[in-house]
Amino acid sequence: MTALPPHRRGVAWVPQDGALFPHLSALSNTAYGLRTHGVPRAEARREAQSWLDRLGVGHLAHRKPGQLSGGQAQRVALARALAARPRLLLLDEPLAALDQTTRAHVRHTLRRHLAEFGGVCLIVTHDPVEAVSLADRVLVLDDGRVLQDEPPSEVTRHPRSPWVARMLGRNAWPGTATADGLELAGGGHLVVAEPLAPGTEALAVIAPEAVSVHREKPTGSPRNVWPGTVREITSGGSRLRLLITSDRAPDLVAEITPQAAAELRIADGTQVWTGVKATEVTVVPL
């Protein structure tokens, strides 16, 4: 490939700053790759306009890059890359400059395109949600070291990094395996259903929806029970996420319904008990 001139390599790249041609409009930027491949001007502009429309910036087609916001310019750069019909698509943080609503829309559009894409796409991102939703294989790097190289479903179920687990919305507690669970690095002990060999450095992953919240100490089946204090309440769609601190365990995020929160009279500062069944804890060796 390196023996070919750049315009014949079939490579499209979206850098973090977009790298749009400042003297061309958004439409001309997007049509540029098609024109270099010999596509007639009218056809190239129609296809370019279609991509701009799909990414929500069609109404900005005649603006120059200097007249676009960062998020708008990033979408134009993505449209330019996709319109060029590349064999290799390189995306460096392609959604980083977008707000949450726009990011979801563009991610959906990009996912649909990649599902039918016949070439190779390499995406660099610091957002695990973006990675597992767009990729068919995820390579997790930490300080230059490969932590995981697996399908997205496996990364989601068994994240091998506290950062990845937390970005995916999971509780992630590092520790050392014992005969019945994990001695936690931050203090405390966690009982698990399938312990690792004693002495193994490991990560315990707990989904927020697996955490039960009570006003009195539970007497049922949870093997892991701690008292705590609600420190933060945030809304996540139809459910509430509670940040609960305790002197007997690391900070814990629980997810409950607004109805349950009302019944428990949950507020910032409320004293509660949390419970996690041993079977709800996934332990991953580090």
Image (cartoon, helix red, strand yellow):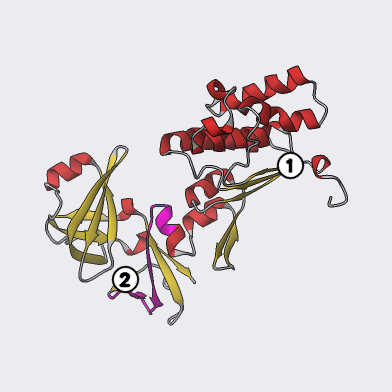
Alpha-carbon span between mark 1 and mark 2: 46 Å
Residue type at mark 1: give it.
Gly
176 vs 86, left or right, is: left
The answer to whether residue 108 of the structure is visible from this angle is no
What's drawn in magenta, residue-wise? 165-187
- Residue 172 percent location from the top left of the image: 38, 63
Q: Which numbered disc covers residue 190? A: 2
**Nearest-to-viewer mark from 1 and 2:** 1
Secondary structure category for the residue under label 2: strand
Q: Which numbered disc covers residue 119? A: 1
Q: Measured along the vertical axis of the image, is residue 91 above or below residue 34?
A: below
Most distant residue in the top direction: 42
Which of the marked residues, 1 or 2, is nearer the chain's N terminus? 1
Residue displayed at 61% across by 37% down = 77
- Residue 83 percent location from the top left of the image: 69, 31
Residue type at mark 2: give it.
Leu
- Residue 254 percent location from the top left of the image: 28, 53
Q: Measured along the vertical axis of the image, is residue 182 above or below residue 40?
A: below
- Residue 56 percent location from the top left of the image: 52, 26
167 in the magenta segment: yes
Question: What is the count of numbered marks?
Answer: 2
